Image (cartoon, rainbow, N blue to C red):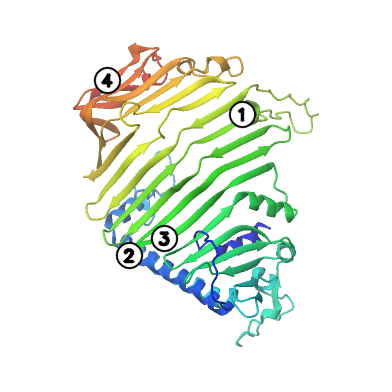
Amino acid sequence: MSRYLSKVWVMCVPLLAACGGTEDREPISASQLALTAQQNVENTLRGTHAAGSFIADSTTLAKLLSASTSCESSAPPCAPGSTCTTPEPVCSDSVTEADLAEAREDIADAIDDLVKTLKDDIFTTENLESEDGHSAVYRLSPEYLCKNGGTDVSTPAPAPGTNPLPNDSSTSELDPDCVRHATELQPRLRLTSPRNGDVDVALLLTAQRRNPATLGLRSDGVGLQIDLAEVKATLDAAHQDTGNLASMSGKLEFELKKNADLDYSFRFNVLSSLSVNTVDDLMQQLAFSLAGNKPSFEIRLDGNAKQVTGTYHFGAFGLKGPLNALYNQDESTDSSPVGSPAPEPVPQKMYTGIIDLLVAGLDGSVTFDGNQDRLVLHALGLGNASSTLKHDGNLLAKLDLNPNAGRHFDLTVERSNDQSTLSITPTFDLNLLLNFASLQNQFDDIPAYALNDNLRVFFDGSNPSVRAEKGQLRVLSGTLNLTSQSVPSANVQVAPGMCLLKSDSDAPAPAHELLGQFTSAACK
């Protein structure tokens, strides 16, 4: 089933956009609808490709992608007592500008293939099921969706030295499971035009013609809107096993939008609040929620300024359900000798209470400036309120970021001589309250500092800066503080010119399990 659905979405996903309303218009033919849809897809994809073309010329990006290059020695182990030489390590290929340029050409070829598929395989007269002057419906046949490129086993292999017979589509193998699912789902594409130059493509599934997704093909962008409640209804109508999924609702959108010439954005939007509920075999219910926000995530390719900017702004999201459903797992193992009677099963431990997690949000933007080889992270934050974790209504943890400085901060990363300098504006102040004592009777491995403590990482002074070098963190400006309210003797303070280092592993057990791992010392 998943293999069949993947082919439906291979055709759908590249055509990203939003839906539009309808209005009275002159009759429009199926061929004109199909042509407009193809042109809008091609124009948007080629425009996006041109806008991001400068990325393939970036030396900095090539170096960043090569940072994970691994080097290993291919020499066999040295025999005891023998004299061995150390061979040069063998390194995997790094990413070059030529590789990026090749990827750019591959994308261009993929766009060509997609446009050809739309014209030759999707919007064809053979697939046209109906048209009425305002809409056109195309039926996607199992012959198209399910062919795997193979040939029938009865087709003889060509004799040596002869040319192979043409691959007749009538002899192509069809995946029988795919054919069955295609017959059950009856996939159709309904094309309508809400306004001149725009086309909506509704994906219709099952005999009920459920509409879980709609493509909006606009003159200035393309997009995909998904209705999660309709997705669940479609799966139910097709008698598909949805496992523990009890319900889901909310509307999501993926869009590729033209801002200006050589300036395009890819966006992910949560159009209406997302809710997903599951029920396990013990009838334990878990609920996940995500507040709506548009845009929730955006990547902007500005070919004019030669900049790539990523922005995310997710609303509050939460998870609520029994602790037993979130944590319980079968840890029993059978270590009895082979052939011996199996031991009696050990009953699973049952955990009690309801866990309620609320993260106030997730915000920020990342800009890569190809002109200055600089990375700027702007307005990083965790929403505009505290994030909390509760158990049966009792507070277990509370997290606050810059509560007295707008709850956000900017971070600029500049790299020089294999060292990264981080500059923060206006400051960084992370406060974590921990109060897990109420769960001690259910867990025996909770660290002492998590039972009742208030941990804080912050800087004294405005606009602090640090530099990562040789496995240590040098403080350039401002004073870095790591503090514990419960064990103030474990506090660490790093003045400008000093470094934050890992503590000596041979030192006596620290007074604080977490802060005791760090120390302030002269830089090495």
Nearest to N terminus: mark 3 or mark 2: 3
Which of the two residues, 27 or 121, is positioned nearer the viewer here? Answer: 27
The residue that appears at 73% across and 28% down in the rendered structure is 336
Q: Which residue is mark 4?
A: 493
With 334 as the anchor, is 355 left or right in this view? left
Q: Which comes before the other along the chain, label 1 or label 4?
A: 1
Q: Amino acid at mark 4?
A: Gln
Of circles 1 and 2, which is in front? Answer: 2
Earlier-in-chain disc, 4 versus 3: 3
Q: Is residue 501 above or below residue 156?
A: above
Snapshot quadrant of residue 414: top left
Mark 1 or 2, nearer chain start? 2
Label 2: which residue?
Answer: 262
- Which type of secondary structure does the marked residue at label 1 adopt? helix
Q: Position of residue 449 (x, y in %)?
A: 45, 17
Marks 2/4: CA–CA distance: 49 Å
Amino acid type at circle 2 is Leu
> In which quarter of the view is residue 256 placed?
bottom left
